[in-house]
Image (cartoon, helix red, strand yellow):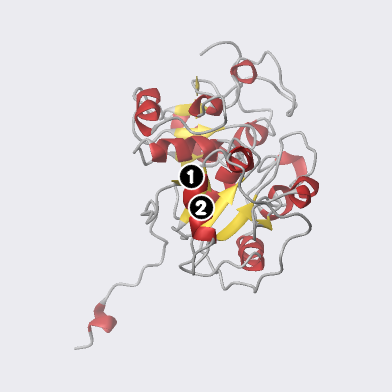
Amino acid sequence: MNDALTEPVLTEPVLTEPVLTEPVLIEPGELAELIESDEPPVLADVRWWLAGPPGRPAYEQGHLPGAQYVDLESELSGAHRPGGAGGRHPLPDPADFAAAMRRIGISAGDLVVVYDPDTSLAASRLWWLLTDAGHDRVRVLNGGYAGWLAEDRPVETGPGRPVPPGTFAGRPGARAQVDADALTARLDAGDPVTVVDVRAGERFRGEVEPMDPVAGHIPGAQSLPSTGNLDPAGRFLAAEVLADRFAGLPDEPVLYCGSGVTAAHTLLALTIAGRGGAAIYPGSWSDWVSDPSRPVATGPE
């Protein structure tokens, strides 16, 4: 009998956390050696700042040799929806994201190294999207472009080298995520879910809100700013230090930020610390407050 004919057909995708085949961070010295090797990685420059300016001019003023610029606003985010549903940075359409990754030369099995100006807050977004799409060979340059420059490594200027298009065809859905309706249902049902707000403490408390129309946080959330994952130079803290930082978090927390970008940074930090299972609320606070019926809390936890 043909075993292939007797196997059950899966009608729904099975969510399994990606098994990463590479360490999640890479240091400038190791990356410099790989760039000069017979199999250099694909380098993705995600130069981005929350309130601007645009990243491409900074990229053209200087970037890692061979790096390709990736625009977080247009290639790592989808179009804004009426009423703000999905938040300020909705997830990109899978076909559009795949096309952007092919544009910068990614094919199945390629090692991809992503970086941003210094803190990896933006680079983490691409790390998460790629691993969510099943591409497990992704590393983040620790300290970003600033760390590369601090070691006096070579740079290129201009619009970037042309590269042959890749064959990337990822399938999003490998990583856990929740939307507002699912999170509300869990909270209303008394599900003991731990919700973690990774924005700055003053935004969590509702003292200031520079980006969204309503200040505060999701009721019951706890504050754990993503900037606390880093040392003063913008490098990730050591794995054991991060493990101590997250020791009080139960398994499978839900992470959110302003619009789903920096939540990925804390997921990356959890991964460095040897913790898995966290879910991201991609729309985050900007999506939560798009519906005035959703509750809002202010003040400390």
Depth order, front residue of 40/116: 40
Q: Secondary structure at mark 1?
A: loop
Q: Is residue 186 visible?
A: yes
Depth order, front residue of 62/109: 62
Is 178 situated above or below 41? Answer: above
Q: Secondary structure at mark 2?
A: helix
* Farthest bottom residue in view: 1
> Which mark is drawn over residue 107?
none
Q: Which residue is mark 2?
A: 31
Mark 1–mark 2 contact, CB under 8 Å? yes
Is 64 situated above or below 199? Answer: below
The percent coordinates of residue 166 (x first, y second) are 59, 72
Is 220 situated above or below 36? Answer: above
* Residue sitting at x 66%, y 46%: 90
The percent coordinates of residue 249 (x first, y second) are 37, 26
> Which mark is drawn over residue 27?
1
Direction from residue 153 to residue 274 in the image, left or right: left
Is 77 situated above or below 151? Answer: below
Amino acid type, label 1? Glu
Query: How dense is the environment of label 1, judged by Cα within 10 Å: few (below 14), some, or many (20 and up)?
Result: some
The percent coordinates of residue 117 (x first, y second) are 66, 40
User: How many dots with numbers?
Assistant: 2
Depth order, front residue of 242/213: 242
* Residue sitting at x 61%, y 64%: 98
Q: Residue 289's image quarter?
A: top right
Give the quarter of the figure containing the N terminus. Answer: bottom left
Direction from residue 257 to residue 5 in the image, left or right: left
The percent coordinates of residue 78 (x first, y second) are 69, 52
Amino acid type, label 2? Leu
* Farthest front residue in view: 152
* Farthest top residue in view: 299
